[in-house]
Amino acid sequence: MNKWLRLACAGALVAGTLSVCALAADFSASAEHLNDLGLFQGTGNGYALDRAPTRAEAAAMLVRLLGAEDAAQELVYDAPFIDLANWQKPYVQYLYENGLANGTSATMFSPEQPCTAQMYAAFLLRALGYNEADGDFTYAQAVAAAQEHGVYDPAVIDTSDFLRDDVAAASYTALSLTPKGEEGTLLDRLAADGAVDAEAAARYQELFNTYAEYREDTAGMDELTVFSISSEYLGGAGFVRGGADGETVLAMQTQETMAFDRTTDTMQANRVLTLSAPDVEDTTMIAESEMADGVMRRRLGGDWAEQPVTAAEQARLMAAYGPVPLAYIESIDKGDHADYPYDSRWTISFDSLPALYSELMWPVESAVGSLDGAEFHALILVQNVEDNRIMTQGLTVEFTTPDDIYGQPVLVSRLNTGN
């Protein structure tokens, strides 16, 4: 019996139960989708999703989302800003001519200054046909308006630490939305105008249409304010070394109840985790958690430990059981419900483990360590819907860690509404 296994059974679970959202959001898939449509470009360091966008980059993105790339490149630059590189001038000129962007002074655009979440929210709202002149929103309230119109999902966009990662997620989400006064999506408009390749657009139009049906089918979840879920890893989860056919080195059993109150943005959780391994006595730990006022409090049978959570982390915790934001989804399908007692069944796949579910993975990380750097072979969520509510969901996560530990745990959660 090696030292790693003894540590896992004896106390490595403490790290997992005292962490919050250990997996950072990574919307590289959204960036890839946008690049596929010709709407997002990388840098010398790839997509550089881990840094803040610049004002010049935001200007270029807005012009592309307006389907005006070619028109902008044909303009003669006569805007008053004297601090622009040649590649930046067409985009700023187009926005300046159309009253869509201003400088930081009469003669400076400050292209290398960071673009804030507020500024980019205003840009996306304008791309969707909303504008300040018509009273659709004010710049001061741009973030709130973006959330209201579905452009910024609080469980996706981190407005306090706004990165190119968030730009990719928000821009991709905007493509699926219906612009003001129109019937199709923003992507439909761009395809009709020839601003994006029609064949490339068709793949995403199909996904967006299916996603719209999914959100309508699960709309009852938005009405739930106070509810709880009970969860367990189906049949326990066995972890092996060296692949799926290897020898089991560790097993875990869990029981968990999480109670949510969306009116106060509070959460309480009670958890029991039992780890079992050959030649090692079973270890059972009872953990309690509660979140309120931007603070997560936890304890493992002893004193409470406090840890601050950001607004984005808090939103993800509150949204971990519910409709999945588009930016996380790789594919989505609605199954035939003839063989099971639900109105519909939705199967959703991901290309990486969403930060949305990092809190739910605490028993796995407690058993095998952090999943950062793990290779994921399958990431699938199945949600069973009845009366527009997600009654059960099962999350399958198949992975191999860098130290060759393989697992395929299935987390099953059930909705308890109390009515």
Image: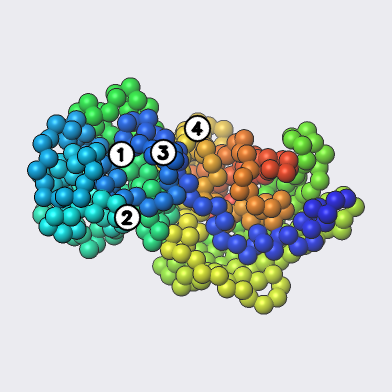
Q: Are marks 2 and 3 in contact (CB under 8 Å)?
A: no
Residue under pointer 3: 44
Left or right of residue 395, residue 369 in this image:
right
Sequence order check, earlier mark of 1 and 2: 2
Q: CA distance from mark 1 to mark 2?
A: 23 Å
Residue under pointer 1: 175
Q: Amino acid at mark 2?
A: Pro
The spot of residue 116 in percent (x, y) is 31, 57
Determine crowd level at label 4: few under 14, some 14-19, many 20+ residues with C-alpha closer than 10 A. few
Q: On residue 335, which mark appears?
A: 4
Residue placed most toward the observer, 415 or 122: 122
Q: Which residue is rendered at x = 46% and y = 73% of the image?
A: 293
Sequence order check, earlier mark of 4 and 2: 2
Q: Which residue is rendered at x = 51% and y = 52% of the image?
A: 24
Does residue 38 appear anywhere in the picture? yes
Does residue 173 appear anywhere in the picture? no
Left or right of residue 60, residue 19 in this image:
right
Residue placed most toward the observer, 419 or 383: 383
- Which residue is the extreme one toward the right? 279
Q: CA distance from mark 1 to mark 4?
A: 25 Å
Q: Amino acid at mark 3?
A: Gly
Determine crowd level at label 3: few under 14, some 14-19, many 20+ residues with C-alpha closer than 10 A. few
Q: For the residue labelled by badge 3, is the local secondary structure a helix, a strand or a loop?
A: loop
Residue under pointer 2: 114
Q: For the residue labelled by badge 2, is the local secondary structure a helix, a strand or a loop?
A: loop
Q: Amino acid at mark 1?
A: Leu
Looking at the rendered image, the disc whose residue lies closer to the viewer, 4 or 3, is 3
Sequence order check, earlier mark of 3 and 1: 3
Sequence order check, earlier mark of 2 and 3: 3
**Scheme of image coloration:** rainbow
Q: Which residue is rendered at x = 31% and y = 35% of the image?
A: 39
Q: CA distance from mark 2 to mark 3?
A: 18 Å
